Amino acid sequence: MAPSDRRPVHQFENWQVWPGSFDNPPVDGNFPAPEKGRFTITPQTPIVSMGSCFAREIKRRLIQRDYHYITEETHHPASMHASAAWERVYSTHCLRQIFEYTFEHWQPDLRWWTAPKSKKIQDPYRRVVLYDRLGEAEKDFEKHRTFSRKVLQQAEVLILTLGLTEIWQDTIDGSVICVPAGPYVDEGGDMSRYQFLVSRYAQNLNNLERIYEIMAAHNAKCKIIITLSPVNLWATFRHDMDVISASCNSKATLRAVADEFTARHENVYYFPAFEMATIYQPLSGRTYFSDGRDNFHINKATVKFIMQHFFKFFATQAAYIHTYSLSWSVDGGCQLSSKLLELSSGSYEP
């Protein structure tokens, strides 16, 4: 009888075998990945991003390196996280709604909140976007729709960062608010029409397919990069499980969705920022959590590691070498990536 502990004989590539297992090389600071699923992004490629805060980190890095990152509404505080004033977007439901209001007729039953005490006008569908008057809100939103169309139609690369699966849905028309936050909620605004739900695999996949359908109709040549935020949920609205389990379920669901969505479309690519942070960094003997009370966030070293590999995966060789050499001179030869702000993400992934 053959011994049960024989080492397997295989002809896999190194990236097909767990780092450091059997005779496979251990982690060495270079995330093992196949060449398939990559394409070239040059400094002239028009790029747009939206989603939770990892998209913001890519935005900052691309701008720092003089890439053609498209920005509009730069005067608007909600644009600091993305190419237009979408603010941070945590769920695929809210991502889908952006594409629907940008290119189609999207009009929820309750369009605006009015805070009971301050009378501030709040947009329920963008994270804490506030106005003094309703007329101002409606006028600004129409401008925003124009800018949103402009950037999405110009993009040759669209980066979508998925965040979480917990949503608050309008029981009347099914629209999904961004997060239950801001003066409307703080001042006792009526939330009885909204129900908390955990969105499931099929719903999230359908949302991404709807986004793809809309982009195919209005900018068919655009490539899409899907990423998954490595930032854990800060809190959960669920009462049936703890926050750690809820966070794991949220990320696992979206990771499975991203895999299926990528497999369905030749112009959709997955960038493994989530795996780089949550698995590869611990394998390297490093934590990916930030210090202090915000330890559900990602530390700066991990952000740098992720961005280093983003350029390795997608930049031209010349641009990649330039990124290294410039970082070397800026950081005094001690760090190979630029100084990025810490990753953050929303609801519960603030």
Image (cartoon, rainbow, N blue to C red):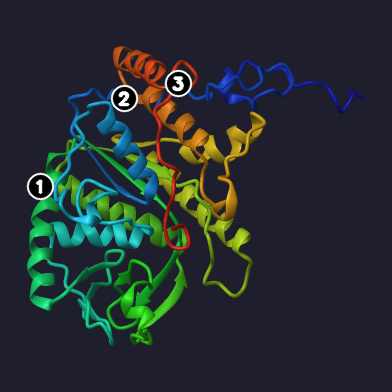
Q: Amino acid at mark 1?
A: Lys
Q: Nearer the viewer, mark 1 or mark 3?
A: 3
Quarter occupied by residue 224: top left
Q: Nearer the viewer, mark 2 or mark 3?
A: 3
Q: Amino acid at mark 3?
A: Leu
Lower position in the chain sequence, tag 2 or tag 3: 2
Task: Give neighbour class at mark 3: few <14, some 14-19, many 20+ (Cα, 10 Å).
Answer: some
Q: Which residue is mark 1?
A: 150
Identify the residue shown where x is 36% and y is 79%: 185
- Nearest the eye: 126 or 64: 64
Number of numbered markers: 3
Identify the residue shown where x is 49% and y is 37%: 300
Task: Give neighbour class at mark 1: few <14, some 14-19, many 20+ (Cα, 10 Å).
Answer: some
Task: Give neighbour class at mark 2: few <14, some 14-19, many 20+ (Cα, 10 Å).
Answer: some
In space, the residues marked 1 and 3 are separated at their CA atoms by 35 Å
Q: Which residue is mark 2?
A: 39
Q: Is residue 55 left or right of residue 229?
A: left
* Residue 41: image location, x then y, percent: 27, 25
Q: Is residue 189 left or right of residue 22?
A: left
The image's mark for residue 336 is 3
Query: Residue reaching furthest front?
Result: 332
